Amino acid sequence: MNNLIKEKKLRPLEEVIKYNFQDKNLFYKSLIHTSASKEKISSMERFEFLGDRVLGLIISEELFNRYPNLKEGELSKKYSFLVQRSTCAIIAKKINLEDFITLGKSEIINKHIKKSILSNIMEALIGAIFLDSNYGTTQKIVISLWNETIISLEKENNLLNPKSDLQEKILSMKKKLPVYNLISTQGEDHNPSFTISVSIDGYKPVKAIGNSKQDAEKKAAEKMLKIISNE
């Protein structure tokens, strides 16, 4: 595929993120997953490394400025939710990022793209935007994409991270931190099911099932919080 065809194919993505790349090569490389890369060192993975840090700083600064009356712990809960993989994957789907990703055959399963890949490419794209422009421009794009999710946190407490809540609760009880263990993995590659247990001194382990390890851990933490709170 020559550069003119690439540019035409990817233009809709530039339109939805409201940014036109000066260096189109950065743009192209951020969307080529490691499984399809011919490079010795994957550019996408390097962009992802950078994008992860840039995203973290932008979200931290936004929360700090937007919520001057929140304590550090409350800010941390919001931050954890906003930068986690599942949230990045949701933002990626919001801009139809899966339509522009180049994948190797090993990662194409029944036309489904893993949430982890969507998340990684989303961060790689942020890294590429930062390299192509500057912090201020990247900040505007990220806040525009994340703003709806940030606002939703003000309305729905259930979006906050139960793992963080459980950790805070346990620390206040002067107990050791919760331990999460993977019990089993079932299902097809494109639709897996994970069973996770959480253990805390003085309590029976609690199990939960989710479509990702992170999801199962959250559900297990929620169950354990209810048990502790009802005592």
Image (cartoon, rainbow, N blue to C red):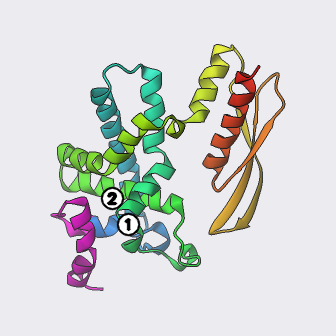
Magenta stretch: includes residue 4: yes
- Asked if the magenta segment contains residue 210, the reply would be no
**128 on left or right of 88:** left
Q: Which residues are magenta?
A: 1-26
As drawn, is 111 to the left or to the right of 55?
A: right
Spatial CA distance of label 1 from label 2 is 10 Å
Q: Secondary structure at mark 2?
A: helix
Type of amino acid at the residue the image marks with label 1:
Leu
Name the spot of residue 222 as percent of width and height, x first.
66, 36
Instruction: Residue 68: give its label.
Output: none
Give the tally of numbered discs.
Answer: 2
Check the image and name the residue furthest to the front: 155
Q: What percent of the width, then of the height, locates residue 65? A: 27, 28
In the displayed structure image, the side of residue 94 where residue 84 appears, left or right: right
Residue drawn at (30%, 21%) of the image? 68
Q: Quadrant of residue 1?
A: bottom left
Look at mark 1 in the image and give the residue it sits on.
Answer: 97
Please report the residue visible at 64 percent of the width from the left and 56 percent of the height from the top. 211
Q: Is disc 1 surrounded by few (<14), some (14 to 19) or many (20+) residues within 10 Å?
A: some
On the image, the x and y values in percent for residue 76 come to 45, 29
- Give whichever of 79, 33 is nearer the camera: 79
Q: Which mark is residue 125?
A: 2
